[in-house]
Amino acid sequence: MSMRRQFVQTTESLLASDERLVVLLGDISVFALRKSFKEFPERIYNIGILEQSTIGAAAGLAMTGFIPVVHTIATFLVERSFEQLKDDFGYQKLGGNFVSIGASYDYAALGPTHHCPGDVGLLQNIPGMEIVVPGTAAEFDALFRQAYGNGHPTYYRLSEKENAESYKVRFGKAQVVKKGRQATVIAVGPALKSALEASKGEDVTVLYYTTVAPFDGETLRNNCPSAKVLLCEPYYEGGLTNEVTAALKPRPLVVETAGVPRKFILNYGKAEEHDERMAITASSIRRRLRKLLQ
Amino acid sequence: MKANLNKLKRLIVKASFHAGEGHLGSDFSILDILWVLYDKVLAINPKRPDDPRRDRFFLSKGQASLALYAVLAEKGFFSGEWLKKYCDFESRLGGHPDRNKVPGAEASTGSLGHGFPMAVGNALGLKIKHFPSRVFVLIGDGEANEGAVWESALLAAHHKLDNLSLILDYNHSTDRALRLGDLRTKFEAFGWTSVSVDGHDHKAIEKALRTKHLGKPLAVIAETIKGRGSKIMENNPAWHHKAPNREELEIILKELSPS
């Protein structure tokens, strides 16, 4: 099942079990959620294509005791209404959930207006904003159920790219997937798949992060026997550099990155073709890891 | 009433002088409206500012915070002494209101075009809960340059938020940049009940705010004068964001003297 389909199922289930949930859709996933529109017409709205006011209205709903869930395409949800996320949720100290689709270049054929590799980096600038990057549909379901009602603003980055298997993920905690001595590979969400392939047979630790903020520095501190870190992220490369260096302070560190380069992606085609062109496939990550281990 | 508001205006001017900060033109533009709201219209209890069934007021043009603070203090939400520390480092009262610091402030505003969407969501939430509470939001004409204002105007009408009233402080400060024209007609075209009123006539403001608007949100276009009550400030754009010096303070206080 895709993450987007899982979002529909999780939402249907929580609308039924939690009267505090109100869902605002930016004119997407409306047909998929038709059952909920019939069953809970007062708590699910196809709000339209007006992202700034949608985030503001979601904050207003939160003020009256509801738990808003806003769902639309990443670039519109985060980049268009960034100031609303900052002022109306971060600064007001309100809880809400922002669930995107169209991660990085999932919409490869639609061009840069529909790409969003900058979502995580932008949201890291909002103090208190929680950022969740699930690696599979099942992980989204687990993480959302753990955190949706915690009173904080939380971003869930859904992607078409998924890992082969799901882990028993806990909100705010990283997982040790593999232990080794020569380097620590940090893989975020759907970047785990290629990170694992790249580190096959290597004497490295692999840590799996599905919560980017708040960052679990403790698991990193306890699982970084070398001074070498490879950051594998599905958004703009090096997004967690500050968190990693802060967690390991004052140790000297070599950080290598494997993520989306900071440039406009002007080709179309399929996401996999972009991975190839930008050298973020398993084999190219393996080359980077080998170089780091030298 | 006039004497009473002059008392609040003096408090505002003194606070602004103390801080070397303030948007006095905006404060004086909306003070009559705020007074009518808090004195005659809003169902609120200063002793229970978080009562879930209270009426809500959102000051979307947060730069007029001193006017809000003066009215909230007068109504007993907090002590008038707080205004004497306006904008001090540890003060709870800043240049824009912070809802987590100011009893009675529904939202932390400042960046224009934010309070109105939040008020829309609030009104929707109260509808879902079937609460009788009403939501009032005040925006400025400069603020109505923002696209989010017109997004929210569409949203409120579409969802038939007849528990929502918007007051537009039409002091024409934005005419020099982007003329808004006939705002009453514009809001009607957006599906609102809309009335125009002299924003300094208390009886007329109250009547306008009590306009029946079944199935629709209400827009009250309040014609106002920026800096109202002080001849040196009235319609003088220099006073948009400016604190008085000692000489100006004395002139303004004299203009606002109770006698």
Image (tube, coloured by chain):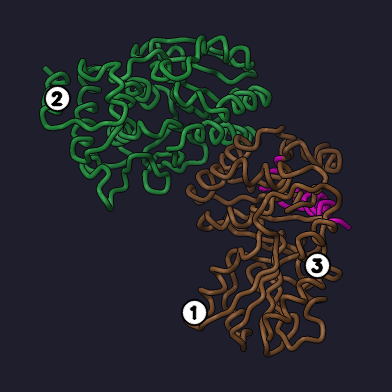
Q: Secondary structure at mark 3?
A: loop
> Which chain is painted in green?
B
Image quarter for residue A191? bottom right
The residue closer to the viewer here, B32 or B151, is B151
What is the x, y in percent for residue A157? 71, 55
Image quarter for residue A254? bottom right
Image vertical order of residue A137 relative to residue B199, above or below:
below
Q: What secondary structure do most residues of the magenta stretch adopt? A: helix
Q: Which residue is mark 3?
A: A281
Crowd around label 1: few <14 · some 14–19 · many ≥20 (10 Å)? few
**Could you tell me which residue is drawn at 42 percent across and 30 percent down?**
B61
Give the chain of mark 3. Answer: A
Quadrant that contains the N terminus of chain A? bottom right
Magenta range? A1-24
What is the x, y in percent for residue A291? 70, 80
Mark 3 or 1: the one toward you: 3
Please identify which colour was used for chain A in the image: brown
Magenta region includes residue A17:
yes
Mark 2 or 3: the one toward you: 3
Mark 1 or 2: the one toward you: 1
Q: Is the same chain shared between marks 2 and 3?
A: no
Furthest-right residue in this view = A1
| Direction from residue B215 to residue A60 in the image, left or right | left
Q: Which residue is mark 1?
A: A249
Contact between labelled residues 1 and 3, with CB atoms less than 8 Å apart: no
**Could you tell me which residue is drawn at 37 percent across and 39 percent down?**
B96
- Residue B253's label in the rendered image is 2
Crowd around label 3: few <14 · some 14–19 · many ≥20 (10 Å)? many
What is the x, y in percent for residue A155? 65, 54
Amino acid type assigned to the residue bearing label 1 in the image = Lys
What is the x, y in percent for residue A114? 73, 43
